[in-house]
Image: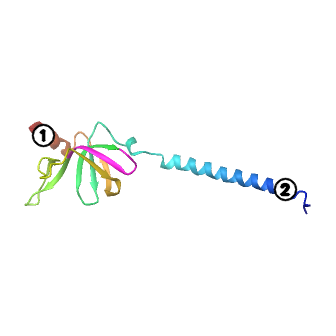
Amino acid sequence: MFSSKHTPIVSAISLVILVVLVGVMTVLAVIKWQKYDGYKKKDFIDQSSYQAMFLTNDQIYFGHLKNISSDYLILSDVYYVKINEEGAGQIVKLGAVEPHGPQDKMIINQDQIIFWENLKPSSPVIETIKKLQLQQ
């Protein structure tokens, strides 16, 4: 067994081992987080294209998406699907028919987004948006 004069040395060694283990575990946790959770939404947003944003209220918006924080995205040059009385949908420019006259930008809480995706230039939605822009 250890004598009482060795107790401070054993305690000091135990403390050093504990500190080293905690440090190693912290470094491993940080490395894992950076490797798997280090992606940012902006890395996936095609700035040259429109995005379709599907919200929890079943509404779909189209526009240019930007990541402004971990909680919010901003959508500009916004269009959306409006259902008429006959049940047919048409694409409408945000601010064109709403009585409250919103600006052409939406700041959207990330909790309200189911998913979003980049649209191809040949998308029928993009072709409709281009036709609407020519009419303006």
Picture quarter with the N terminus: bottom right
x 38%, y 51%: residue: 71
x 66%, y 50%: residue: 23
Q: Quarter-wise, where is residue 122 in the image?
A: top left
Picture quarter with the C terminus: top left
Residue where numbered disc 2 is placed:
8
x 50%, y 49%: residue: 36
Q: How many badges with numbers are in the image?
A: 2
Q: Is residue 41 magenta?
A: no
Q: Quarter-wise, where is residue 55 in the image?
A: bottom left
Q: Quarter-wise, where is residue 75 in the image?
A: top left
Q: Residue 76, image x and y in percent?
A: 25, 43
Which mark identifies residue 115? none
Question: Relative to 40, is 58 on the left or the right?
Answer: left
Tag 1 secondary structure:
helix
Residue where numbered disc 1 is placed:
131
Q: Residues within 10 Å of mark 1 (few under 14, many from 20)?
A: few
1 vs 2, front mark: 2
> Can residue 118 be spotted in the picture?
no
Question: Relative to 57, is 86 on the left or the right?
Answer: left
- What amino acid is at disc 1? Lys
- What amino acid is at disc 2? Pro
Tag 2 secondary structure:
helix
Q: What type of secondary structure mainly makes up the magenta span?
A: strand
Q: Which residues are magenta?
A: 68-78
30 relative to 48, above or below: below
Q: Residue 125, image x and y in percent?
A: 19, 46
x 12%, y 41%: residue: 132
> Can residue 19 be spotted in the picture?
yes
